[in-house]
Amino acid sequence: MANKHPSMKMWSGRFREPPDAEFEQWQRSIVFDWQLLDEEIAASKAHASALLAAGVLTQSECAELRGALDSIAVEFGSEAGRALVRDHPSAEDIHHFVEIKLVERIGALGRKLHTARSRNEQIATDLRLYLRKQAGLCIEGLAAWAGALIAVARAAGDAVMPSYTHLQRAEPVLVAHWLLAYVEMALRDADRLKDCVARFNLCPLGSGAVAGATLALDRSIAARELGFSAPTANSMDATSDRDFVLEYLQALGFIGLHLSRFAEEIALFSTAEFGFITLPEAFSTGSSAMPQKKNPDFAELIRAKVGRIHGAAEAVMLQLKGLPLAYNKDMQETQEPAFDVGFVPQMLALVARFARALQFNRQRMQEAAEAGYLNAMAAATYLVHKGVPFRTAHEKIGNAVRYALEKGVELQRLTLDELHQFGAEFGPDFFAAITLHATLDCHDVAGGTARGRVHQALAETSQRVAALAARGEAVHAGA
């Protein structure tokens, strides 16, 4: 029986009735997967190469197909062109859109490209290419943020600030040491992304709908052309796997987590109560009611973004948890969460510029580091060097701190006679051992805040960060 509803559907031959009009619009993914145009073009060109090697296409047909695909990329590559893709009246998805445009350009040859191919493998391939590119951009963004932190740390020199545990002042540290803590987080985040990409940088093309291509394609051709390390090993897994989307989103969750911690400290330290940091005006806003206000809106928005990222990962987890093998339409819902976190590379670029613009109130930070008995640990260490067991030294200094609190002075303001009531081990050299610099430098271990150790860490970490931007470019290319 003839088709009662001629259309450009890729699957309409088996159906007698047209789809419900509202359902048809509701199930279309072109409204979001238009963002995969570049990846769909690249994957389609690679498939054409595989069809050429298999003898399905002639050399001239392959060249004509690839040329037409390139022309589609050019025509719809601008922002206005992408809007035309998104708003196409009849294309179901990005795969359908490209096929429609191919047929418009080169006729029946455009339909030949879908030989030995399924949309199930197409979307699995396109998403991997897209996330690989996004991961590379994120790694480059992490390199920019880490580089900005290192530049600020270098400029801070030997500036000092209090560190905190339980939000209570703990010990003095170099400002550079504090900043380098976030550099370590950024480096770990980049490693997670690189590891994530290494696991999914495999090419699904040739997997067919579920059981593998129906022609003897050399799958290594498409994999090589697209920069994948190899073809996927199992067709059912390849077409139904979205682990890579989930793992990517979870890796971004760590980035959001670390940026949020950084933003929280900046917002906190910029308050009048702390007064350690002056917010850059270019990244702040005012109040419509209170003329004096300068609000840390950028830091607050950064802090909030982790919720969106975590929500995207949780959504994908719930979408996948009960799916039988292999492809199910549910998987269409894993795309939007991946696109929804597309703001992360821009966020990293902004936070890098924000970090470089921060100004520190060095005097206020040093005053805070020199008050509140933050040299008590160094004082206990002094007694340890005199042969006092640490637990005993801890108790002696605790008693001295209590006495100083009652007297309203810092430890270094106590006299030697006053100190002798807590132990005969105190000598004139005690006061040199608890100066600010001595308190810093007694932490002379790898990873400690001693001035020499931090200067060394800056040099070593700078080299690690310098390699990070190149790593992002390599990930982007599939290397």
Image (cartoon, helix red, strand yellow):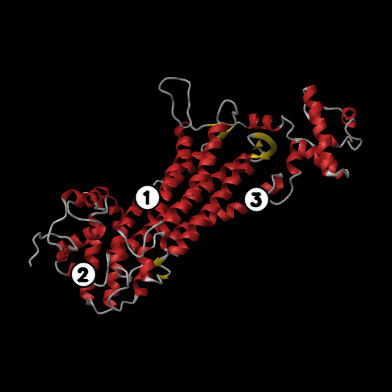
Nearer to the camera, 467 or 268 = 268
Residue type for callout 3: Ala
Query: What residue is at 44 percent from the left and 41 percent from the top?
Result: 305
Q: Quadrant of the N terminus?
A: bottom left
Residue type, numbered disc 2:
Glu
- The percent position of residue 96, horizontal first and vertical second, equals 22, 60
SS for tag 1?
Answer: helix
State yes or no: discs 2 and 3 in contact (Cβ < 8 Å): no
**Tag 2 and tag 1, C-beta contact below 8 Å:** no
Rendered-image quadrant of the C terminus: bottom left
Which label's residue is closer to the chain start, 2 or 3? Answer: 2
Q: CA distance from mark 3 to mark 1?
A: 38 Å
Tell me which label, 3 or 1, sits earlier in the chain: 1
Q: Which residue is mark 1?
A: 337
Of helix, strand and loop, which one carries label 2? helix
State whether residue 314 is above or below residue 211: above
Give left or right: position of 327 versus 68: right
Rounded to the nearest angstrom, the CA distance separating label 2 from label 3 is 56 Å
Residue 158 falls left or right of residue 305: right
- The numbered dot on residue 307 is none
What is the number of the mark on residue 457?
A: 3
Which residue shows up at 82% across the image and 31% down it?
399
Image x and y of residue 277, in percent: 57, 32
Residue occupying the far right of the picture:
424
- How many dots with numbers? 3
Circle 3: is it few (<14), some (14-19), or many (20+) Cα within 10 Å?
A: some
Q: Give the image quarter of residue 276.
A: top right
Q: Is residue 11 left or right of residue 406?
A: left
Q: Is residue 428 shown above or below 479?
A: above
Q: Is residue 21 visible?
A: yes
Q: Which residue is mark 2?
A: 64
Q: Looking at numbered disc 1 in the image, what kind of residue is underneath it?
A: Pro
